[in-house]
Image: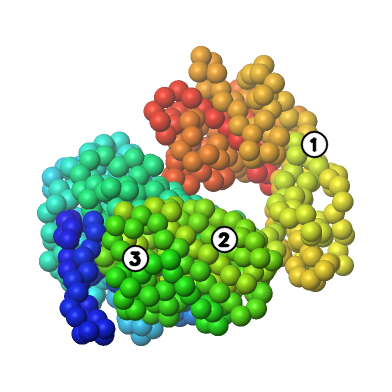
Amino acid sequence: MFYRVYILLFLIFSTGNQLKAQQAFGPVPSENQMRWQEMEYYAFVHLSVNTYTDMAWGFGNEDPKIFNPTNLDCRQWARIAKEAGMKGIILTAKHHSGFCLWPSKYTEYSVKNSPWKNGKGDIVREMADACKEYGLKLGIYLSPWDRNHLDYGKPEYITYFRNQLKELLTNYGEIFEVWFDGANGGDGYYGGANETRRINRETYYDWANTYKLVRELQPKIVIWNDNGDRADLRWVGTEAGYVGKTNWSLLNATGKVTENMLSHGVEDGNSWVPGEVNTSIRPEWFYHKREDSKVKTLPDLMTIYYNSIGRNGTLLLNFPIMPNGLIHQKDEKAVLDFAQEVKKVFAVNLTEKATAEASGILENNANFGADKSIDRDTETYWTTDDQAKSASLIISFDKPTAFNRFLVQEYIKLGQRVKSFKLEANINGEWKELATETTIGYKRILCFPTVEATKLRFTILDTKKGALISNIGIYNAPQILTAPQIIRKQSGAVAIILSDAESEIYYTLDGSTPTFKSKKYTNEVATSGSKVEVKAIAYNPITAKSSAVAEEKFDIARKNWKILSSNDAKAYEIIDGDFGSVWYQDKNTSADVVIDLGKIENLVGFRYLPDQNLRSKGIVTKYQFYVSLDNKKWELVNEGEFSNINNNPLWQNKIFKLAKARYIKFTALENTKGDNVAGFAEIDVMTK
């Protein structure tokens, strides 16, 4: 992917009817990239055989007969996406298991051998039709890694992979984006071989020719790829819903891309490669019933909005489809509330009743005046002389005005230029700094405590070339209360933590929904050693507003647990209930963690939480879990992988057949970095 570094945009000036050539600086977006950037917000949907096995990833050996979404309704998916303000849907047509949601003629491992619609169904077709009906764009996710296919890792697989691409990109209308996941190679079924296969993800797929095929079949498409050759879009290095505050839409066309580059781009990069922020409405990508109480709250989603779209990115928000083929009603409510809140925040642009004055404009030409930044036309812009490295714009109100959000956009069709800027408010005749930030790009949104001012000053501190500011918006967003955090300590006591000092906490322990009439939280709540369900809200007595309900279900208390495999006192941090504390095993000791539960319990599963710092050391990927009645005779009850744990370090929940045990043993077999470090934030069990 290469872009012309210099283009000419001819503008006819009204003054003197002169023709002026306005030149781009550095890489610029292609038409396809610009069209994609302007979408801003669109959906991901995940549904496959592992929806029915409660696994993050399929292994490739799952029987197609388990796939039966009896109430599947792509029109429901499209309706929700449309009502949520999304502009398109990317369908996971084939995930790592290799199971295809369309009746591909190149494999039997697809919907055609499932009971759904007696093998006559085609989810990609239904999705394409639903998108067309609701005016949405369609995107396709096709996993390069295929854990089912016999030839994966061999040259023959590339032919198969491209044949499937041809099916998807020729039979379902216009595709706006194709998504090639970065997970590649590892253990799998592979036609019955049941082995581990490694590939070089930069060279194996012959990306140059694969891209060529994609562009020939879909000229208006953008390509997302985290493997090898540079694509049109880049991953931002996390699935947590944010991109770096500094975010250049640039990378170099060749060379290694580091984690820092994924998050921040490259200031002097020679290719336009903007970042797409992908995250899920729930903790994981596929549906798990246990996450019905873990749907992202309104404050969560608004934070994601500001940290993605508001940081020069786009937002790709995932819906895990339930086994019945529908989006859960809690997920639907969350995104519709989110849509309403975004509308509410940006409903009134305070610049509509304001005036703008600039420190300078290009050749004193009114076509580039300060007013062009607040005329709500993103095709016009305020700019200064090209050599000006700094400039300022003052927006004046006719009376003291309250605000807490600032939106600014560059005219990126001529390049991303601004390197740093400052925001100040004139309060009671004095300038007060609100923020100093770096990049702007397509859109930057700043959040800060509410101020009441008569003027706002936007100062460009440094820019590559004369800045082009196409839009400025000023808003006063309503307060949203953040739900409290609920934890259970090793003692069994429940602690509930507020995010602000002005609110109060009310809670219940019986599963009922709390209100301000429920029990008020003042200190840690003592509980018995058995299971407990805690629900809590934050409540502001001044505004009478409540937060969303926070919910946590805790299993047996760990008060009497003893760690037998280590004499290190810090080892008890893995059962202290504090997700921020981490213990690492001594490299020179056994990789086993042995715990005495204090008495015999009826176990049906266990839970592992890694270090919550992204891609930290000691994140276990492969494990074995044993139980014992006497700490002598051990029974292996579960083993396997923690899929996608490196990019999404969440609680890992593993279920097994009922087993009576007093002792448990967790054995770390492999970690994400390939060394012998094992790290633990928490270990817990699930009981019947």
Asked if 482 appears above or below 137 in the picture, the reply is above
Left or right? Give the position of 325 relative to 550: left
Q: Residue furthest top?
A: 588
User: What residue is at 74 percent from the left and 43 percent from the top?
Assistant: 488
- Tell me the kind of residue under disc 3: Thr
Left or right? Give the position of 676 relative to 334: left
Which residue is at the front of the view, 541 or 182?
Answer: 541
Residue underneath mark 1: 491
Which mark is in front, 3 or 2? Answer: 3
Alpha carbon separation for disc pair 1 and 2: 49 Å
Q: Which mark is residue 384?
A: 3
Label 1 SS:
loop
**Which corner quadrant of the image does residue 408 belong to?**
bottom left
Q: Is the Cβ of the residue at disc 3 closer than 8 Å to that at disc 2? A: no
Mark 1: few/some/many CA within 10 Å (<14, 14-19, 20+): some
**Which corner quadrant of the image does residue 566 belong to?**
top right
Alpha carbon separation for disc pair 3 and 2: 20 Å
